[in-house]
């Protein structure tokens, strides 16, 4: 089966994504960093399919992608002392590690923490915001390989994906910042200068 490929500016994208989330389809989607592959974070079959496609072990959580900063607090505890850091970094090219709320989807939680993204991208600000739904996601590549950006290569590598949304991407993976420790630390990439000079902690 060949995936359905749509430009992110197509007026039918919102309906296609809604249908994909409701019917257990896998989605490749654009962000401000790289393309992601994922779907409905509460659909165990979709989660299992993406794990199999990626060769990803069950103990590796997926990043939760939400449409706006306000949605972060639906799935993660944002303590007063880290709120300014969250507001400064998001939307943007960061994955923030935060204490998970009970409402967080299990596929994105490990050791009571969750990795959350708010991409600075029109697909999220417009399409996903209109749907009011998050996406779980991970980079489009087999585990251990470089992220892919060419649509034909992505389809060749993952022909069983159901829906591909095209859009501009930045090209580099997000920096991962752990805000569950004080001072914060970068798990991938660099710690922003503001967090190096302003100690921050977290909590419930």
Image (spheres, grey):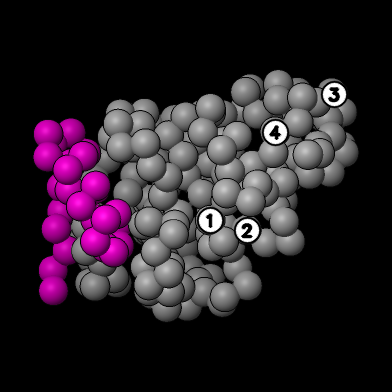
Which quadrant is the N terminus positioned in?
bottom left
Quarter of the image holding residue 199? top right
Tell me the SS state at disc 3: helix
Question: Label 1, on which residue?
Answer: 105
Q: Is residue 87 above or below residue 46?
A: above
Was residue 15 drawn as part of the magenta stretch in this picture? Answer: yes
Where does label 2 land, which residue?
109
Please say if the residues under marks 1 and 2 sit with CB atoms less than 8 Å apart.
Answer: yes
Image location (x, y in percent) of residue 154: 28, 63
Mark 4 or 2, nearer chain start: 4
Q: Which residue is drawn at 53% across and 56% down?
A: 105
User: Distance between the Cα atoms at labels 4 and 2?
Assistant: 15 Å
Residue at left offset 51%, top offset 49%: 64
Pointer 3 residue:
197
**Which residue bears the numbered disc 4?**
78
Among the two numbered marks 3 and 4 on one chain, the one whose residue lies closer to the N terminus: 4
Q: Where is residue 106 in the image (x, y as percent from the top left)?
A: 57, 61
What element does badge 4 sit on? loop
Q: Distance between the residues labelled 1 and 3?
A: 33 Å
């Amino acid at each position: 089966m060949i995936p359905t490929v749509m430009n992110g500016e197509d007026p039918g994208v919102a309906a296609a994504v809604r249908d994909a989330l409701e019917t257990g389809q896998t989605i490749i989607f654009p962000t401000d960093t790289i393309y992601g592959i994922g779907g409905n974070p509460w659909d165990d079959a979709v989660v299992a399919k993406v794990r199999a496609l990626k060769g990803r072990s069950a103990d590796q959580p997926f990043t939760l992608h939400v449409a706006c900063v306000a949605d972060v607090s639906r799935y993660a505890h944002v303590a007063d002392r880290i709120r300014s850091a969250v507001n400064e970094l998001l939307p943007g090219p960061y994955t923030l590690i935060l204490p998970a709320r009970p409402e967080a989807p299990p596929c994105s939680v490990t050791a009571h923490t969750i990795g959350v993204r708010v991409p600075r991208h029109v697909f999220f600000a417009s399409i996903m915001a209109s749907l009011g739904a998050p996406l779980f996601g991970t980079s489009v590549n087999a585990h251990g390989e470089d992220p892919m950006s060419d649509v034909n290569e992505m389809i060749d590598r993952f022909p069983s994906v159901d829906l591909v949304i095209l859009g501009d991407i930045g090209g580099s993976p997000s920096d991962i910042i752990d805000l569950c420790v004080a001072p914060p630390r970068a798990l991938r990439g660099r710690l922003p200068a503001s967090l190096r000079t302003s100690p921050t902690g977290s909590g419930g």
